Image (tube, rainbow, N blue to C red):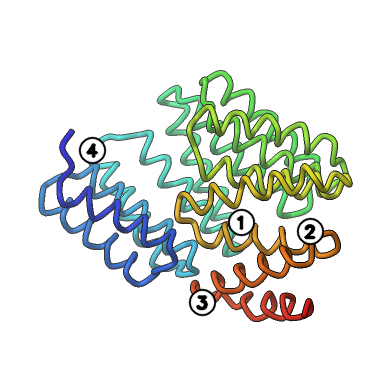
Amino acid sequence: MTKNAADTALEDAEKLWLSGSAQQAREAFRRARLLYHENGDGPGEAAALIHLGDFEAETGHGGAAREAYTDARALYARDGDQHDQAGALVRLGQLAHREGHIQEAEAFYASARELYDSASDHSGLAHVTKRLGHMERDHGRQDRALDLYGEALRLYRRANDTLGQANVLKAMAQVHRQLGQADRAHEELEQALELFREAGDALGEAAASHSLGHVLAHLGNNAEARRHFDAARHLFAATGHLRGEAEVLRDLGRLLTTEDPVRAHAALKHAASLFRRLDDPRATDVEMEAGKFF
C-alpha cells in the first residue's frame, strides 16, 4: 500500500517522540490526525488519536490524553469496530488507574471486557486481564496479580499472540523479582526475550534484555548482566529510543564501577548527555556519579 502524507506524518511523529523532541512530536501527531480527517479516513484518524493519547499520557498530560482516547473511541464506535473501541477503553482505564481513579478504571476495563467477549477476542480479553493484574500489583497484592497474569498468559497462548505472551511474562518477572524470586524472574525473562525476537519487536527485546541484566547482576553473574545491558543499549540506540539508551548506559556504568572504572565513567557521561538532551532531571545526578571517578 502506498504511503500518503498522513502516514508519513504519523511515522515522523513516532520518530520525534523516541528522539525526545516532544513539541515537534505533538505537532506531527496532530498534523497526522488532521490529514487523515481531511482524507475521510476514520480508522487512520482514530489510530493517530491513539498514538497522540499515548504520547500525551507518557509526557504527563492526562487531560489531553483522555480527550484523544475519547475521540478515538467515538470514531471506532461509529464504524462498529469493537476490537479497537475496546482498546481505547483499556487505555482510558489505564489512564484512570495512573491518576488514582480506581473505580473509574475498573468501569472502563469492564466495558472493554464486554466488547472483547462479544467479539470472541481472546487476545483482547488477555490484555484487559493483564491490566487488572497491573492494578493488583500496584496495590501490593502480588499473589492476586500473578493469578491474573497467569490467566492472561493462557488467553494469549490460546490466541497465538506471541507479543502478548512476551509482555505478560515480563510483567510476571517483575513481580517475582519484587518477591525475591530471582530464578523465576530469570526464567520468565528468557522466555519473554525469545518471544520478543520471534515477534520482531526490537523495543520489547531491548526492555527484556535490560530487565534480565538487572536480574543477572542480582544473581552475581556480572559478565552475563553486562552482555545483556550491552545488547539492550544497542537495540535502544538502533531504534532511536534515547531514554531507554540513557537508562541502560546509567545502569551499565554503575555495574562497571569497580571492575572497569574507565568504561564506567564513559557510560555514565554518555547517559548524562542523553538525559540532558531529553530535558530529563536525572541528568544532574548521573553527571555527579560520573564526576566521582576522576
**Is 172 on the left-hand or right-hand side of 216?**
left
Picture layout, residue 226 above or below residue 17: above
Task: Residue 152: name its quadrant.
Answer: top right
User: Mark 3 or 4 closer to N-term?
Assistant: 4
Upstream in the sequence, badge 2 or badge 3? 2
Residue 263, position as x, y percentages in the image: 71, 63
- The dot on residue 279 is 3
Q: Amino acid at mark 3?
A: Asp
Task: Describe the element under mark 2 as helix, strand or loop.
Answer: helix
Q: CA distance from mark 2 to mark 3?
A: 24 Å
Residue in view at x 44 percent, y 59 percent: 18
Name the quadrant of the C terminus: bottom right
Spatial distance from mark 1 to mark 4, Cα to Cα?
A: 29 Å
Q: Which residue is mark 2?
A: 255
Q: Position of residue 27 (x, y in %)?
A: 28, 67
Q: Amino acid at mark 1?
A: Ile
Residue matched to label 4: 79
Residue 135 visible in rendering: no
- Which residue is denoted by mark 1 in the rendering? 102
Q: Nearer the viewer, mark 3 or mark 4?
A: 3
